[in-house]
Amino acid sequence: MIRFLELKRVNSIPMILSQSIKKKALELGFQKVGIAKAEGTPEAKSNLYNWLNSGSHATMDWMAKREEERGDIQTYFPEARSVISVGINYFSGHSQSELKANFKFSNYAWGDDYHDVLKKRLFQLLGFIKEKSPEVKTVVSVDTSPVMDKVWAQKAGIGWQGKHTNLITRDYGSWLFLGELIVDLELDYDSPFDEDLCGTCTACIEACPTEALSSYQIDSEKCISYRTIEHKGKFSEGEDDLDDWIYGCDICQDVCPWNQKFGQVTDEPAFLPRQEILTWTDSDWTTMDEAGFRKLSKGSAVKRTKFSGLNRNIKQNSL
Ligand code: B12
Ligand code: SF4
Ligand code: SF4
C-alpha cells in the first residue's frame, strides 16, 4: 500500500508540473499548448527526406544542411525529453481588400515579427519552469532551429497538417504561429491529433495560382511565398508569376473552410496591421526607398527580404 502511494506521488509530479506549464502558457497569451514526448518521428523524417530528395526545398539549402537534426529531435538535442508546443493566433480580422494598394501583402507580416513575439513569451514560460526546476536544460525554438514545428504541434495534440501543409486547429483554423520549448524534463504527454479533418475538400489545391500544392505536399519553387521571401536574386523565366503578391501569399489559407468558419480575431495588438500596410498606395510601394524600407521593416518579419528583395517583387508585379 505504501509502495502504491509512493508511486502515485512520484507519477503525479509530471502531471502537476505539466498542468501548471499549460496554465501559464495560456496566461502568457498563447491560445494553444500541448506537450509531446521528445522521441523519433520516423514518418515525418521520411517525408522530409523525400521532400528534400525531390528538390522541393528549391534553394533553401539551410533546410537540407541540418536534415538529420530536423528529422530527429534526439540528434539535435540528445537530452530532450519533452516538447512543449505552443500556438498563437495572428488573425487580425482585416482582409487584403482593405489594403489601398493593388499589391498583396501576406497577413502574417502585417504586424510585429512573430519570432520576437513568441520568443519573448517562451522565455517567460521558461522562467516559470526554472522557478520549479532550476537545473532544466532547454531549447527555445521559433522557426529558427532545425525542428519541424508543425510535426510537434500535431504530436502535442494541437491540430493536423492540412492539404496546404499548414497546421490547422479546430478552434482558430490555421492562422497560428508555432513555437516550442524543448526540455530535458519528463512531463505528462497529450495524445497526438490523429484526425485529418480536410475530408474530401481540395479548395486550397484548386485555388493556388501557381499549382504549388499536391495533396499534403508543396513544391517550394512554385510557391509565391517562397518566391517573394526566400528566393534570392533575379527570377528566372517560369518562376516569375507572383500574382500581385509582394510579400508572402495567403491564398491557400484564405480559401480554407476552417479559416472561414473558425478564424477568430486576435487580441494581440502586436499582430494588427501597421499603418503603412493599410494605407500605402501602389505609388508609395513603387517609390519606396531604402529609408522607407528600414522604417517599414523595423521589428517586422519583412526585413528577411531586405530592401532589394521587396523592391524586386514590387518591380516584378509592376511589369
Ligand atoms: C520551409 C518553410 C517554408 C517553405 C516551405 C513550406 C513547407 N510547407 O514546408 C515556404 C517558404 C514555401 C514557406 C511558406 C509559408 N510558411 Co513557412 N515554414 C517553413 C519552415 C521553416 C520549415 C517547414 C518544414 O519543415 N518543411 C519541410 C516539409 C517536408 O514539411 P511539410 O511541407 O510541412 O510536409 C509535411 C506534410 O506535408 C507531410 N507530407 C509530406 N509528404 C507527404 C505525402 C503524403 C502522401 C502525406 C499524407 C503527407 C506528406 O509530411 C511532412 C512532414 O510532416 C517552418 C518552421 C519550422 N521550423 O517548422 C515554417 C512554417 C511552416 N511556415 C509558416 C508560415 C506561416 C508560412 C506561410 C503561411 C507564410 C505566408 N503567408 O506566406 C507560407 C505557407 C505556404 C504553404 N502552403 O505551406 C508557419 C506555419 C504555421 C502553421 N499554422 O502551420 C511555420 C510553422 C512557421 C512558424 N513557426 O509559425 N514556409
Ligand atoms: S502560399 Fe500561395 S503560392 Fe504558396 S501554396 Fe499557398 S496558394 Fe500556393
Ligand atoms: S482548404 Fe480544404 S483541403 Fe485545403 S487545408 Fe483547408 S480543409 Fe484541407
Image (spheres, rainbow, N blue to C red):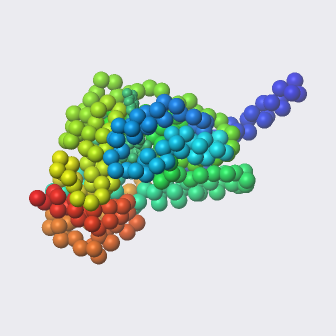
Q: Position of residue 318 (x, y in %)?
A: 13, 60
- Picture quadrant of residue 161: top left
Q: Position of residue 301 (x, y in %)?
A: 37, 60
Answer whether residue 113 is visible to the viewer in this image: yes
Above or below, comparing residue 177 to residue 287 in the picture: above
- Picture quadrant of residue 164: top left
Q: Position of residue 298 (x, y in %)?
A: 37, 69
* Direction left: furthest residue: 319
Quadrant location, the C terminus: bottom left
Q: Position of residue 240 (x, y in %)?
A: 19, 51
Of the pair 184 and 264, the residue shown nearer to us? 184
Above or below, comparing residue 169 to residue 96 in the picture: above
Quadrant location, the N terminus: top right
Q: Residue at x 20, y 66 (%)?
A: 285
Q: Residue at x 33, y 46 (%)?
A: 58
Above or below, comparing residue 92 to residue 304 in the picture: above
Q: Residue at x 58, y 57 (%)?
A: 123
Q: Residue at x 88, y 27 (%)?
A: 2
Of the pair 289 and 99, the residue shown nearer to us? 289
Q: Is residue 203 left or right of residue 160?
A: left
* Direction bottom: furthest residue: 291
